[in-house]
Image: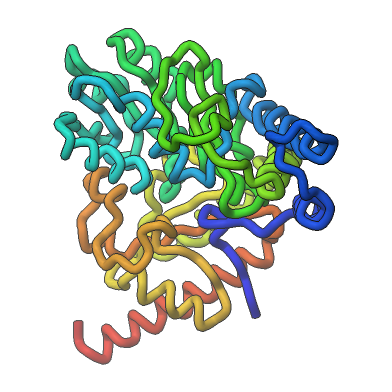
Amino acid sequence: MKLYLDYNAGTPLAPRVLAAMSECLSGMPGNPSSTHQFGRAARARLDRAREQVAALVGAHASQVIFTSGGTEANNLALHAVTAGRTPGHLAVSAIEHPSVLEAARALQKSGWRLDLIEPDGNGRITVEALRRVLKPDTRLVSVMLANNETGVIQPIAELAACARAAGAVMHTDAVQAAGKVPVDFEATGAQLMTLSAHKLYGPKGAGALIVDKALELEPLLYGGGQERGLRAGTENIAAIVGFGVAAELAGEAREAEAVRQAELRDYLQAGLKSHAQITVFAESTQRLPNTLQFAVAGLDGETLLMQLDKAGIAVSSGSACASGKSEPSHVLLAMGVDPELARGAVRVSLGRETTRQDIDTLLGAIAEKIEWLNKAARVAGW
């Protein structure tokens, strides 16, 4: 038995994505910066992909800057706003992906001051929490649109209005949200938005930063002036084309899949809550339709993960980019969850292939592990 329930970490390539990428890899030798017919053919595919990605989030194609993934796009966002400027203040949510948090901490070494915006107990960043940390010289506010661990959706439009009223640039990491919930770049009020292909059935190694054209930004990479001068280097045509097709497919499937996956998530949640030892995090808050995070009291999350893996079931203990770390989830700790309970956290993320039978299989496997835990406790006289 092999059951994949870790779609927030990565998704399989959609068949149409693979076909489009294979066509580029086998029959498109031209550099999109070249003016001959081979270069023009590559440029046409690049332009089409830019339009497809922009359409997914209601942006204009000229606002799309392709990168090697979400991590580079997040780093570019923070660097582009701060490079060459007198150090000031940054406000970043405490529940961000490591590619935002670590980039912000790196800026501290060059004189920038950093405040983390703390979430409430449900994992939401409120306008009041943002106002508490804003300073007269706040240059950038970064809050993700949806959290990769809990799935909690943030009130980005309200936060962006607050940040921009204070004179700060607003960045949002929409990697987990795009393709799962409606995302409109202009409506969010954000001036910078991060996307990644491999979260929506596209290839790993392709991402984008959506940029408000009114911003004056500094590039992270210098060279031939590709991507409006913000990301030099010959574009990875095959990966970008795959990204474009994946974005188009995600837009087509989003509404129906959101309903279907939310029903499966709620079914999973009801099954988990039948066990008194299980805590479901952020259950009363608006979340991504495919995401649920829980913990079994007294059972370490990594232990449960490994036991499920032996049973052929793939889930996650949190962000894939933070795997291998023994510390409790920084997201849950910021929410005020007890460290021992946070250490037991497991994330389940559903996808297009997930069925109700899959959920039953997972629930049965978890029930077996809880029974094993309780039996061990009785034998030990806990």
Q: Which quadrant of the figure has residue 49?
A: top right
Q: Residue furthest top?
A: 165
Image point 54% across, 60% down: which residue? 6
How far across and how far down the image is residue 288, in percent?
53, 41
Residue occupying image coordinates x 55% and y 22%: 185
Where does residue 187 sit, x and y in percent of width and height? Answer: 54, 16
How many marks can you see?
0
**Is 123 displayed left or right of 288 in the figure?**
left
Image quarter of residue 118: top left
Q: Nearer the viewer, residue 106 or 334?
A: 106
Q: Which residue is drawn at 28% across and 32% down?
A: 92
The reply to whether residue 169 is in sight is yes
User: Is 5 placed above or below 281 here?
Assistant: below
Locate the N terminus by quadrant. bottom right
Point out the image quarter for the C terminus. bottom left
Q: Which of these two is toward me, 151 or 185? A: 185
Q: Residue 89: x and y, percent?
A: 20, 24
Judge left or right: residue 362 versus residue 25. Answer: left
| Residue 171 vs residue 61, the one in the foreground | 61
Q: Residue 249: horizontal and vertical position, in percent?
A: 75, 41
